[in-house]
Image (spheres, rainbow, N blue to C red):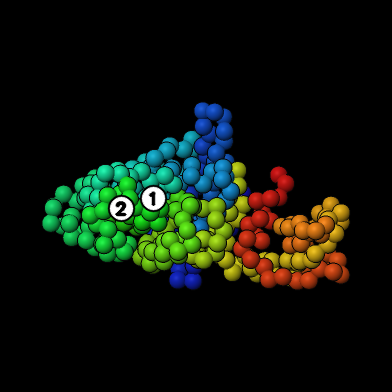
Amino acid sequence: MRARVCQSAEGVTNMLEIRGLTKTYSSHVQALKGVNLEVPSGMFGLLGPNGAGKTTLMKIVATLLEPDSGTVEMNGIDLIVQKDKTRRILGYLPQDFGLYQTLTAEQMLDYFAKLKGVMDKKRRWLLIDTLLERVNLSYARKQRLGGFSGGMQQRLGIAQALIGGPELIIVDEPTAGLDPEERLRFHNLLSETASENTVILSTHIVSDVSNLCNNLAIMRRGEILASRTPQQVIDELQESVWTATVPREEVPTLRSHCQVISSQNQDGFARLRVISKRVRPREDFTPATPTLEDYYLSLVNQPE
């Protein structure tokens, strides 16, 4: 079934269209099961637990992996067949962005710029200056990458992804392992980047998508479960999220007639957060403000 498409308020441009994408590995693991998705311009969140198939999907879009079947198109380009054209419009920051530890930041960007066809030295160094300034790493341009923090490495990764002025940028689990300050810096950088491009943020961190994305899709076990805007998510859960503190022995009974999103145990009691569609589970439950995390957990934890 095709996922419902949501359009941003600004309209749809640079639409990435994914149709019927399947992939089964030699180990017989079916990573993608007929994925259909439309990604508009701006920041798009691909949200799902580890093992959902997000990285497989991103690698196919980035021309690094061949699907078994299906198509990926953007602005008239077949991203699977026309790999050279795809790589000219693509910027990619993989989950494991390998760095040459002995190179400096400017040497690393110089290397990537050559790979992307920027052969004129004067133009290349002007580009490097601009990129380092944009990601706030000008001060570290001559520092060896082995001494970079995780956040500095990720910002340098975005800098290399921006070489060539790509129309489509893919970032795969970019904030995993970053401290709160570096995560905030990286969020700001991604927001600035998305104002000019289509950016796919693939992550299992709900707050990253909630803070950054105008549109999102939720993925589990190789399938797209939903495609929405954050506001649509909140609207769907209005008057459906409830909280209460109850004796622990009552939790199994409550699970039988409402969906428990979270349960925190303390001193023989459980603090529950549940979804019950517009029906109060019991008199001791109070309404709660719905969040994207509520919606996400309600989908990925559903029995198959």
Quadrant of res 16: bottom left
Q: Which residue is mark 2?
A: 160
Q: Position of residue 290 (x, y in %)?
A: 67, 68
Residue in the image at 18% along x and 60% along y? 126
Residue 93 numbered mark, or none: 1
Q: Position of residue 162 (x, y in %)?
A: 31, 56
Q: Position of residue 86 (x, y in %)?
A: 34, 48
- Quarter of the rendering occupied by the C terminus: top right
Q: Residues within 10 Å of mark 2 (few under 14, many from 20)?
A: many
Give residue 28's mark: none
Q: Residue at x 30, y 53 (%)?
A: 160
Identify which residue is drawn at 57% across, 51% down: 48
Residue contact at pointers 1 and 2, CB within 8 angstroms = yes
What count of labels does the image hold? 2
The picture quadrant where one finds residue 295 is: bottom right
Q: Is residue 171 above or below residue 294?
A: above
Judging depth in this view, the residue of 130 and 295 nearest the camera is: 130
Instruction: For residue 288, say whether it is visible.
Output: yes
